Amino acid sequence: MGNDNKTKLIPLDTLKPKLIDQLRERRFAESTIHCIEIEIGHLQDYLSANQLYGYSPEIGSAFLKEFSENGEYSEKSYANYLALIRRLDDLYCGRDFTWRHSSKQTTEPEWCSIALSAYLENCIANENVEKSIIRKEVACRQFFIRLAENGCCCMEDISAENIQAATLAEPAESAHCFVREMLSVLASKGLLKADYSTLVPKIHRSIKLPTTYSRDELERVENAPDAETSIGKRDIAIILLSSRLGIRAGDIAGMRFENIDFEGDRLRFVQGKTKNPIELVLLPEIKDALEDYIENGRPGSSSDYVFLSVKNPHRVIDRTLVHYIITRHLDKAGVDYTGKKHGPHSFRSSLATAMVNNGMPYDAARKVLGHENPESIKHYAALDIENLRKCAIDVPEVKGIFADLLSGKERG
């Protein structure tokens, strides 16, 4: 692929810092930024391989086409690269930052843009995480679209009647809490003539129990990769880090050689999610798997990241590939995950449940998983059915009117 003289090319080194600055200004998690930097590195490899000396939207489209035809990455990974290209295209064209690029052509009306921006700025000021802000933006955009469909042409047109109509038209009840919060914020800022938040129903959701897999199922997944191949050696090490130590996908993908102390049998790294340092014991089986991969399976590379892709150019993997690896070997091991989560976090949940149910003190289990909140580990205890049965109270003897009703007697 050659340069098109009619197309202006902007050096990727010019666009990259601008994008990273945008992400940090909007309080994206550093772990997310790290993954995006890896993705930009893959794009740079593509430019170099094709002797391209800058970026344009046409080049971005060609990169996505080649990436989709590669076959090594999951659909979710492709979606991440698509989001990167769209953000680079926005920078290239001088467009404002967009939190989420929707595939739908329908957009919210222009009259609500100030209100939506004010709400999102409030979310940023309250240090909402990136994923929450994206979900809130999507829900509130759709809410404004429904308001317009109900006859609203400006903020002054908003009334109790069309708010209720727009809320009833929303099939996803989980979005209600975001809309309710937005209406409250807009009223406090004087952008609405009244606080309509009380008109949006509150949804009381039950607490979901974490997904877990049995020890037998985990061992089948651990034994699923072919230990004689390079990709199998890599996958075994990744699976063990997830199943035996509960390390998050982003932290596995971002692991560097400096994080591994083979002599002291320790892993030390800063968690991407919490930004807190953690030190874990390098279990013998994980140590053996890492050494086997590094010595016999890892491609030759000067990269200081441990895990690389198998195909040329040997790129640093990302968290979506970690998720794909675990799902692929769940399938290979014949583990049924219908209706269950099936990524690294489910292995983390399984480890947490096993530790608690085997009698490990909550605080010790919490430290292994790197949780800050002392309460965060306790809900895993609810999955220990056998021990919960020991706490069951005997059913009291039935007496009086209730006994008569059960026996079919009629009382005069």
Image (cartoon, helix red, strand yellow):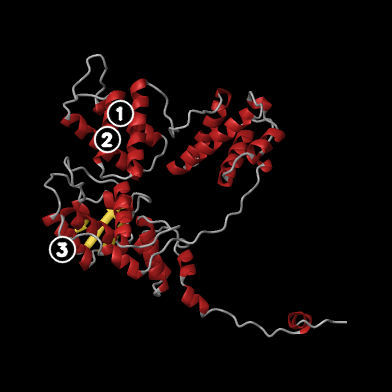
| Amino acid tagged 2 | Ile
Q: Nearer the viewer, mark 2 or mark 1?
A: 1
| Amino acid tagged 1 | Ser
- Mark 2 vs mark 1, CA separation in Å: 14 Å
| Amino acid tagged 3 | Glu
Kindly give the residue lying farthest to the right in the view shown. Answer: 412
Q: In the rendered image, is residue 191 in sight?
A: no
- Residue displayed at 17% across by 28% down: 50
Kindly give the residue lying farthest to the top in the view shown. Answer: 6
Q: Please name the residue that numbered disc 1 is placed on.
A: 61
Residue 327 location (% of width, % of height): 33, 55
The reply to whether dot 2 and dot 3 touch (C-beta < 8 Å) is no
- Residue displayed at 17% across by 40% down: 313
Could you classify mark 1 by the number of other residues whose Cα lies within 10 Å: few (under 14), some (14-19), or many (20 or more)?
A: some
- Residue displayed at 19% across by 61% down: 289
Q: Is residue 357 above or below residue 65?
A: below
Q: Please name the residue that numbered disc 2 is placed on.
A: 40
User: Which image quadrant: the N terminus?
Assistant: top left
Q: Please name the residue that numbered disc 3 is placed on.
A: 263
Label 2 or label 1, whichever comes before in sequence order: 2
**Residue 176 placement: quadrant:** top right
Q: Is residue 280 above or below residue 182?
A: below
Label 2 or label 3, whichever comes before in sequence order: 2
SS at mark 2? helix
User: Which image quadrant: the C terminus?
Assistant: bottom right
Could you classify mark 2 by the number of other residues whose Cα lies within 10 Å: few (under 14), some (14-19), or many (20 or more)?
A: some
Label 3 or label 1, whichever comes before in sequence order: 1
- Mark 2 vs mark 3, CA separation in Å: 34 Å
Residue 62 location (% of width, % of height): 27, 29
Residue 23 location (% of width, % of height): 37, 35
Between 9 and 282, the one lying in front of the other is 9
SS at mark 1? helix
